[in-house]
Image: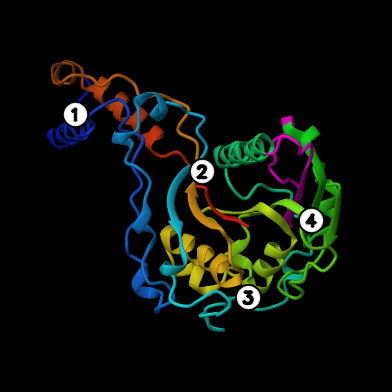
Amino acid sequence: MMFVTKSLLLFILVVIHSSSDSDAFQLDYTPTQSWSSLMKGVVRSTCNKKTSKSASTVPMRLRQHLLMASRLISSFDKDDFALPTGEWPYTRADMGRLDAKRDSFFYDAPRFVRHIDDRAIESLTEYYREEMTAILSNNPKKEKLDILDLCSSWISHYPTDLQDKFGFVVGIGMNEEELLRNEQLYMHYCQDLNENPSLSQFGDNTFDIVTNVVSVDYLTRPKEIFEEIYRVLRPGGIALMSFSNRCFATKAIAMWLQADDIGRMTIVGSYFHYAAQWSKIDALDVKLSPKSRPPKRPSFGEIFQDPGAALAWASTMGSIMNPGDPIYVVKGVK
């Protein structure tokens, strides 16, 4: 029999006892107020005012649906913010960065890398599929989707099986070589949005969707950029700002580095609010549920007979409970 210390065995028993059913790995996400005290009056209340239903109130069939790619964390409204639309509460220090040099130096060399892990990318693609399919379903006369990808790179993560539904797909990014490699773009522009936030090359009401993948934290002039996003979107169009917990720390703005995930959702939500009168602003967790189902828990008797089975169960559960990079989206509807 494998040797197991009493303390380790007790720990395993506690972990097993605390897992009340086979869905224990699907943790409810309840926002906290841990960052609101740092917002200096920018936001009146944190995101937990309107949270999604607890998993316990959702049918088991839905909880076990592994391809549900979006879960509402919170909806923002104007009362959540200290100032009205059009004002701007942030200081130069809030927008400061450790590396204050022009971004063109930082992005001069191409980076053909993925900035989030495969499961996060898969989750974002599935979420895009949900949103794109919904637009097409709700607008039967619409045959093609026109899309603008801001801070674009060599991949845009759009679902390839919907490629025939794409119309005018444009990327704006920092590196020519990366943008040329992106097969989902119809055309592209090299443009530093921190130097020139204008999207004057596009007319009003040009796009159905505007996306930005894990780059909103690098924007130093977000109000101007979000004003432009609103202008180029068609009525009912959507802006999808996604982010994870990774970043180039020297290029991310100061208040982003000081915030937790809930605080970052609030920051992006405030960008929408202060830039324009959006009809809806939502914060979402779009990470897909783990692919693996949790193994059957060993009973107390089985643990005492074979402690190795308990260690194997704990190890498997540990891998399921650590699903990799999170992925969040703050969505604005024009």
Image location (x, y in percent) of residue 126: 60, 36
Image location (x, y in percent) of residue 259: 44, 66
Q: Earlier in the sequence, mark 2 or mark 1?
A: 1
Residue drawn at x 84%, y 60% as measured from the top left: 189
Q: Nearer the viewer, mark 2 or mark 3?
A: 2
Badge 2 local density, few (<14 within 10 Å), some, or many (20+)?
many
Under circle 2, the secondary element is loop
**Residue linked to disc 2:** 286
**Residue linked to disc 3:** 99
Residue 4 colored magenta?
Answer: no
Q: Nearer the viewer, residue 283 or 192?
A: 283
Above or below, 2 against 224 in this view is above
Q: Earlier in the sequence, mark 2 or mark 4?
A: 4
Whole-Å distance between the Cαs marked 4 and 3?
Answer: 34 Å
Above or below, 227 against 131 in this view is below
**Residue linked to disc 4:** 206
Disc 3 marks which amino acid?
Asp
**Residue linked to disc 1:** 4
